[in-house]
Image (cartoon, rainbow, N blue to C red):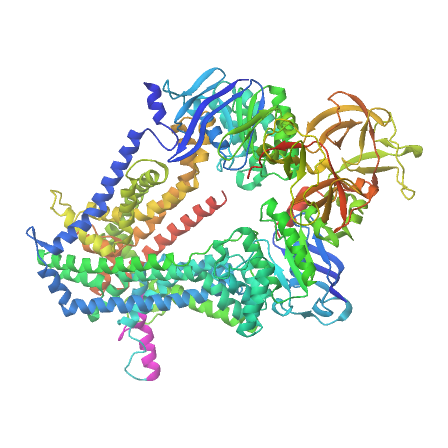
Amino acid sequence: MAEVKLENVTKRYGDKIVIEDFSLSIRDGECFTLLGPSACGKTTVVRAICGFEKLENGEISIGGKVVFSKEKNIFIPPEERNIGVLFQDYAVWPHMTVYDNVHYPLKKRKIFTKTECHNQTEIAINNVKLDRLSKRLPYQLSGGQQQRVALARALVSSNQFICLDEPLCNLDANLREEMSFEIKELQKKTGITVLYVTHDQEVAFAVSDRMAVMDRSGRIRQIGAPEDIRRNPKDSFVFKFLGLSNFVSLMKDGNELFVEEDGSGLSRGGVKFPYPFPDDIKADKLFAACRPRDIELTHDGKLKGKVLRVIFLGSIYEYRVLLGKDELRIQEDSYKVFQKGLFKEGHICGIEFKNLRYYEQVEVM
Amino acid sequence: MSDVILKDVTKTFVTKTFGSVIAVDKLSLTVNKGECFSFLGPSGCGKTTTLRLIAGFEDLTEGEIWLGGEPVSIGGGSNNRKKLYLPSEKRKLGMVFQAFAVWPHLNVFENVAFPLRLLKMNKADIVKKVSEALKHTRLSGTEEKVPSELSGGEQQRIALARAIVTQPKVLLLDEPLSNLDPKLRESMRFEIKDLQQKFNFSIIYVTHDQAEAMALSDRMLVMDMGVVQQIDTPINIYNNPSNKFVFSFIGRSNFTKVEIPNGKVYPIGCRGEDIKCEIPKDFRDKIGILASRPNEIDIVSEGGVRTKIKNRVFFGDYIDYRLDIGDQEVIIHTPIDTDYKVGDICGVKFNKVKWYPIQEEITEEDREKRKII
Amino acid sequence: MATRRKELSIMGGASIDTGQLLLGLSVIILVMAVAMPMFMIIINAFFHKATFDFKLFSRVIANPDNTGAMLNTLIVCFSVTIIGTIIGLFFAWLVGRSDLPLKKTMKALFVVPYMFPPFIGAMAWALLLSERSGYLNKLFMQITGGNTAFFNINSLAGIIFVETCYYFPFVFIQVASALERMDPTLEESAKIAGAGQLYVIRKITLPLVKPSIAAGAMLILISSISHFGVPAILGFSRNIFVLPTKIYELIYKSAGSFEGIREGSALSVVLVVVVVLALALQRYVLRAGHFEVIQGKSMRPVLMNLRQFKYPLMLICIAFLGFVTVFPLCIIFASGFLKAYGLSISIRNLTLANFEDVLFHSKMARDAIKNSVLLAVSAGIITMFVGTMVAYVIVKLKVKGKGILELLSVLPYSVPGIVLAVGVILMWSGAFYFNIYNTFWIILIAYIARYMAFSMKSASASLEQVHNSLEEAARSCGSTHWGSLTDITLPLIKPGMIAGFFLIFLPAMRELTTSLLLYGPFTRTLGVAIYSVYEEGNTVQACALAAVTITIIMLGQLTLTFITRERKGR
């Protein structure tokens, strides 16, 4: 139960700037996710909050108390910050059993009686579904099980704030889904503030109240509730990062848009792109962004494309279609395709778009 | 003529810890010329062992393996036929491994030329064939480089070039893309498929990734605990999984235990409302499992089995709703324009279901044991 | 302000002050233990009364006795390396890539020669094959009716033979483990491509283990150059010298005179130059060609079917092991029970007198046992702690100047034992107001210098396994820096430290080279005692003492194996 604030935090390794003037505000009782590609600096943010990095600049406060300030020369050591952490390499102590690993922080906090410590340990172990294995040593557990031990340990380490750095990446898909719901449940129940760090947007959607999308240079691109960001991505980086994307290269001529030619003869200059677009785009070149599920293939239509590939993936069918010079990726539930009929490779088909967004440039990831 | 035939192939391992384990149990299959055939199953199911039997790295306990119309492995025991085992180097196969198995001390050219040198081809021919193979795998110009200078995807393509350079009739691939990142995996799938269409060899492809198997195969085999569960085309397997295991392995699933007193279907222990769906004519049991896919059943505001929304998570391409029918959870995935909130009263409509009998489950521990072998 | 000091106690160590303190302490210890002795040798070799004097050095090098010794050294070390490599490679391949039965036993047994003091092996072989009185030679002469021995062990060939028996495991261990770790699909893909078994070995397996072969061969080379024990036992009686034994002779014959020590220093410089050249060769060889051949999936490698050669080869392996390990040991133990050397081994010639003597009556023997145990234990404990501290500074602390430490830490490893002894004499015999020559302490200091490298390597390995994140996790659970050291780091390196202790205790127990130059009337070690008793001609007593030493070592080795096996469980 604590609010966490970072202001203008900067960290450098030699000449390389990892994060610069980084500011973030996490609300009390919130589950906040830092979402970004690998090596973007999100782990550095966690380490900075926990007190494991020497920072060049900035101020960090937890629950209203300043734990670091370059200006005021304040630095509270890690063990006094009352934060629970789960590191990326989970750091489970190999010489202690599951029980002892989870019990350790409770022992160190010195605020509970022996019985309370024991009870809380048992509850935490049960929550991560390791109750049968509490007497085992780490080498007797799989990677996924070890990760759960570290998760339980992090969850009992603090009653105000927990940082989880990729806590589920070693679990298989089913277990990952189960545990992400579990974490959400626990968080809602206890009201603890959680900072979750990951590159996996599926998990981010499952657990977050709000999230921040970071790019490779450590800058935050957008903050908001996951659904809001997904429905309204501010720029093409966020659009690309949050799911499979299609971009159609367009040219503006007066009030109309045209598909950029490619010389294949399909969309030779003059093929209109018959969709409305916002007035505030001034450039002559722009891109229409669209999700694979928001494109439909029809038997005729103003826009025509050539089907390059048809791929059956089980619950969905995927089409690769050439429009102008861009290859579009289209997905549709297979049971619908079975009802409507399949488009075949090599055929020309009509293309219809829904939910288009427009961007002036497409960033390279 | 079929390129690969397996008849009742069985492989038993004797281990110190678990005694005798049947890794592959009376497996029979045929791979036709130019076909792309996948082995799909969880880790430890026997698919890699089967591939290694075909390659000749292991000798089978019983059964027969024929390649290109000639027998290569015949086991002792049944049939009174004499035992036969043709070593790997004589089977004229091409193979690609999961960890690439590209030789680090040889450059790209020597890696790909290796099989040709063994055929005692003359120098000029070798150079010609290697260049061709490298062209087909988009590696032209890298001849002088050593593998450590190239990326994972490029190394796998060296392995591919090496496998096809002798133009074998059958290409074996053992989880070849599992060590690559997801984007690369997708593009390499197409490259493999294109190569197959160009050269018309048969492919046997081992994977644990069902999407990959579906995307690539003409036909596939689903395996569990050493036993074949189903052999068919991907579409048929998806639409008609032969049992509960195949159903769950091929895609997301709901399994709702139901009972059928007097012709009506109820969730077990919950006689309130009945589920309106067809009971297959040959289903005689009084209890069963209703299998459904989250994206093939609907939430309806009126009608259906009445319940309420327990949980809702937005996942970008779909919304994940959790509802309880009786005390069993059902997952439904809808497009993102549906607008139900947690607590809303609604109904579940089981549009498309499959029926399975209730059977004893194989535990995770049983499966774990097999992974070690 | 309290918080300022706390700011300095960021992850990676204690406050910077403590870090610098530890660094300084470590540097001082290493300099005094290792660098200074070396420095003294150079001074003595090249300086006379504070002026540079090359005459002594050039005289020593030109002396034909010394050049003879240099030549012998080269002959021996290259022969041992080549033959040892071939043998080691052969057995490594048999164990790693064929379906030879009893492989686990073989693997364990092939490592045994590596654990024994080679000079005791030399003694055993001398009992069997000394020209006149060796048992095997006498048997041969009986059978042939002639006067010529089958083989005279007191020769260069004899020295090469015995050293090879004890050094081949270096290559065996390196190659066997490389074969074990190699990804089997590298060989499988060759087979699929059409290659037969031999072609795979030639074109794939061998090239890929070449780095390991080279690593093992280099180890043999460097060990053989510096080796003292075997040439001492087998060569002295025939005036056959190699550099290490020649250095000893120069100093010993001169009875501690200044001239003798200077000559010894000069020759030591030559020896060190040779070792440094070998080390440079080692670095060059190891750098060229380093392949990542570590496997991922746990698959068994394809084994070559030996068919009809299976049992014959197994018998060859067993015979070889028996010949190299068991046979000499039996002879030592058996001779310990004989009344006198030369008597045939029959019941009426056996006695317990030698063992009684050694264990209960001989003061010298009992002193030797006491001294060796005391020295080995003290050296073990001190080196273990110092080594851990130095390793901690290098591995875990972020202080400026630890490069010096890293440099100094390599030194002890490369200095031959005899040279270190010479340097220690020069440094601690009054040159700096400390004269501890002929005392227990000078030997202890020499041991600490000698074995520091082992302790540091072992401690570094242990510390590296304790990832920083383990300590950080403890701190974020509420533990102070010191708390995380005691709760996490220490328990995790404890098994490594104990193993490190035994890694020093065992070699120190059987050590000969260094103590032979440094012992005084009351500070004989076991090695010295066995050697001097043997040189005096009291063969059977020497064997009894050797047998006792071997027993102590074997018990120690078993304890070590027991501890490390426990640790493997973690």
Residue at the extreme top: A64
Q: Quadrant of residue A73?
A: top left
Which x, y percent locates residue B329? 75, 30
Left or right, C33 with respect to B198, comes to left
Residue at the extreme bottom: C145
Left or right, C71 with respect to B288, comes to left
| Nearer-the-camera pick, C37 or A246 | A246
| Nearer-the-camera pick, A51 or C181 | A51
Total label count?
A: 0
Split into 4 quadrants, where in the image is the N terminus of chain A? top right
Left or right, B351 with respect to C246, comes to right
- Tell whether position C140 is magenta: yes
| Dominant secondary structure (helix, strand or loop) of the stretch shown in magenta | helix
Q: Give the residue drawn at x 19%, y 47%.
A: C36
- Tell whether position B87 is magenta: no
Residue range in magenta is C124-144
Q: Quadrant of residue A272?
A: top right
Which x, y percent locates residue B69? 74, 69
Left or right, B362 with respect to C150, comes to right
Which x, y percent locates residue A53? 42, 29
User: Please, is residue A364 above or below residue B124 in the view?
Assistant: above
Which x, y percent locates residue B252? 73, 39
